[in-house]
Image (cartoon, helix red, strand yellow):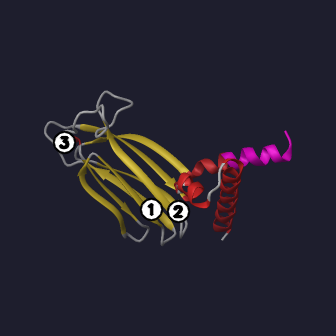
Amino acid sequence: MGRFEVFLLALFYLGLWGVQCLRFELPSGQTKCIAEEIQNNVMVLGNYHVVEPGSDEHHYGSANAHPVPDDHKVTARVTSPYGNSMHYAETVDSGQFTFTTSEAGDYLACFWIPPASPPTKATIDIEWKTGVFAKDWTNIAKRDKIDGMELELRKLEEYVKSIYDEMLYLWG
């Protein structure tokens, strides 16, 4: 394998850091949090939803799903490293957040369900994108009137820049 192929393979694997998808179970009366260390001035995009019990594909609110019971609704909060609230939603079955970081450090997303009798358990999917992966490339292509190879080259340029910036951040 040549240097260029190794570079592209490394770039692909390094690029996977920008998107994280996670599914977890949340018992009533408990809180679960996830965190990601993010640099200053980075775009963050997150989507989360409660998964319909007994289903791997449907979530509440989709066309084929049933209404979410109140005891499966979650409260979600995303905070900055200094505790500033970036997103807050109470008793919801889905939500999304978008922001550009203003502080470097660990950004925390916490989910909880109030205690219930009998105890319940909700399954939550969250997709968390940062940096290049949070960009809306379809709209960028339309706005700049680019397509095909030029769009892919622009994405590749952004990936390389984000890797370079991350290396500078880690060395700093």
Q: Within 10 angstroms of label 2, few (less than 14), some, or many (20 or more) residues?
A: many
Residue drawn at point x = 65 percent, y = 50 percent: 147
Residue extending farthest to the top is: 54
Marked residue nearer the N-terminal end (3 or 1):
3
- Image location of residue 88, percent across then percent down: 30, 60
Q: Quadrant of the C terminus?
A: bottom right
Residue extending farthest to the front is: 145
Q: Within 10 angstroms of label 3, few (less than 14), some, or many (20 or more) residues?
A: some
- Alpha carbon of mark 2 to alpha carbon of mark 1: how far? 7 Å
Amino acid type at mark 1: Tyr
Q: Name the residue under label 1.
A: 107
Marked residue nearer the N-terminal end (2 or 3):
2
Which secondary structure, mark 1?
A: strand
Q: Which residue is nearer to you in this view: 1 or 82?
A: 1
Q: Mark 2 points at which residue?
A: 38
Q: Name the residue under label 3.
A: 71
